[in-house]
Image (tube, rainbow, N blue to C red):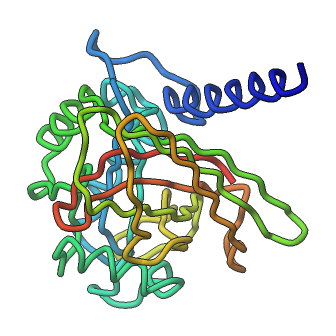
Amino acid sequence: MKKLTLTIIGLFLISVMFYSCESNDNPITQNISNKKSQSKVLMEFFTAVNCPNCPPPGHFLDLIDSLKGVSINDTNIVIVRYHSNYNGYDPYYLFNPTGSAARHNYYGYLWNPAGTLMGVNLPNYDQSVWLNNINTSLEKKNPVEVGVANTYDTASRNGTVNISLKQSSTGSDNDLKLFVLVTENELAYTGTNGEKVHQNTYRDMLTNIAGDAITLQPGVLMNVDKSYTLKTGINPQNSHIVVFIQSQNGKTVYGVERIKI
């Protein structure tokens, strides 16, 4: 009886973790159409506090992050903003330049603004074009389910991310990398482009900056634990942990999830 009870508890915890993939930590808002979101998508935005052309796409993403009903399901869009120093001093680039530079270089971005959706570089910013790409991506089913739980001790600033990964039978590339990173909201700094508050800002990479190599088997659940110490200067109350799976060579993102610290 004891062994059976433990088995049931274990299955329950796994089901809860994957059920969390269906919605973000934010409340769900009504969709703008009768289209249905199948998965979460990763929107990576490359910006800078002194970039003159960055505010329009940045404000567009702010509306999504504020759950204004911009897309067919704003809650299923995970946003990460990487800063650069292309336009001069940027405190968010300098906070952790190695990680930001690595993501810029990975996608071949030597300028800002720029956007990447599920690992695919978007064209120059046009709201209707970006929105159409986002909605199309939301309607697709990701081949990798990502479940995330997190424990964090406020005194020591130590935590552990518990990650569950399950690849569907449709398969994916065999050069997969796991990325676990920290983003922070409500960062206040006014650059020359007039933006005053910065959301979803990249702050730290908990894996290797090029990701950690993993091997998934269709239908087989994989659990990964990642321990971390939150860097000084990051406010845990405004921060999230973002987890995604990406093909190293193809750059395709196969699954993404985030959770509040």
Number of numbered callouts drawn: 0
Task: Decide if residue 235 is on the left or right side of residue 90.
Answer: right
Q: Position of residue 61 (x, y in %)?
A: 35, 47
Q: Give the residue at x 37% y 45%.
A: 217
Residue 103: x, y in percent? 32, 74
- Of residues 32 and 244, the one nearer the viewer is 244
- Residue at 16% over, 39% down: 133
Residue under the point 33% across and 80% down: 102
- Which quadrant is home to the N terminus? top right
In this rendered view, identify the residue nearer to me: 180 or 189: 180
Drawn side of residue 37 relative to residue 94, left or right: left
195 left or right of 252 in image: right
Query: Where residue 144 appears, x then y in whole percent?
Result: 37, 40
Give the camera-side residue of 224 and 22.
Answer: 224
Q: Is residue 36 above or below residue 225?
A: above
Could you tell me which residue is drawn at 58 percent across and 56 percent down? Answer: 224
226 is higher (above) or lower (below) than 102 = above
Residue 225, given in percent of the width and then of the height, sits at: 64, 58
- Tell me the quarter of the picture where residue 38 sits: top left
Image quarter hosting the C terminus: bottom right
Figure quadrant of residue 209: bottom left
Task: Name the outermost residue toward the top.
Answer: 34
Q: Name above or below for residue 23 compared with residue 190.
A: above
